Amino acid sequence: MKKTRPKHLALWQIKFPLPAIVSGLHRISGALLVLSIPFILYALEGSLSSAERFAAFKSCIGNPFVKLGLLVVLWGLLHHACAGVRFLLMDIHKGVDLPTARMSAKLVMVVSLVLTVVLGVVAW
């Protein structure tokens, strides 16, 4: 009997459950945070080195694209923290049954987005 399995997996056609999406976003947000560390450290070092570099940093932060990038990094930090707490609880076998796992995944998405909006409004 010949099997008719696909030879190439089309990820964009697969409907992932929300816990899988949260897990994937946790990995993506972690990579985003690691990649943003050199830029954030460079900006911090420059803003603390002299008044002229602080003024340049301040004018750079005024750019809407830079603000959007910082907002994405802020979301990455908040999502990574919220999902990390969820995964730590799952590691000690709290919330591993399917309904609780789905509810906690929804909670992670909502809390990380709400915190991003609130902190983004407060910061800018």
Image (cartoon, grey):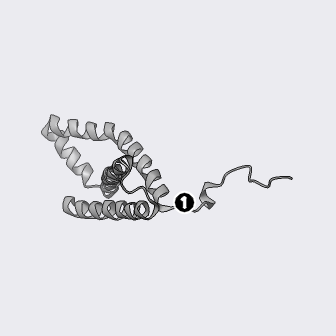
Residue 42 horizontal side relative to residue 20, left or right: left
As rendered, which of 16 and 30 lies closer to the eye?
A: 16
Looking at the image, which residue is at 38% across and 57% down?
Answer: 95
Q: Quadrant of the C terminus?
A: bottom left
Mark 1 neighbour density, 10 Å: few (under 14) some (14–19) many (20 or more): few
Q: Amino acid at mark 1?
A: Phe
Residue underneath mark 1: 16
Looking at the image, which residue is at 32% across and 59% down?
Answer: 112
Residue 121 horizontal side relative to residue 15, left or right: left
Above or below: residue 52 compared with residue 113: above
Looking at the image, which residue is at 31% across and 62% down?
Answer: 111
As rendered, which of 119 and 16 lies closer to the eye?
A: 16
Give residue 44's quadrant in the image: top left
- On the image, the x and y values in percent for residue 114 come to 29, 65
Give residue 75's quadrant in the image: bottom left
- On the image, the x and y values in percent for residue 49 come to 16, 34
- On the image, the x and y values in percent for residue 34 come to 37, 40
Q: Secondary structure at mark 1?
A: loop
As rendered, which of 62 and 12 lies closer to the eye?
A: 12
As rendered, which of 87 and 23 lies closer to the eye?
A: 87
- Residue at the farthest left position: 51
Residue 110 horizontal side relative to residue 20, left or right: left
- On the image, the x and y values in percent for residue 55 come to 17, 45
Looking at the image, which residue is at 19% across and 62% down?
Answer: 122
Q: How many marks?
A: 1
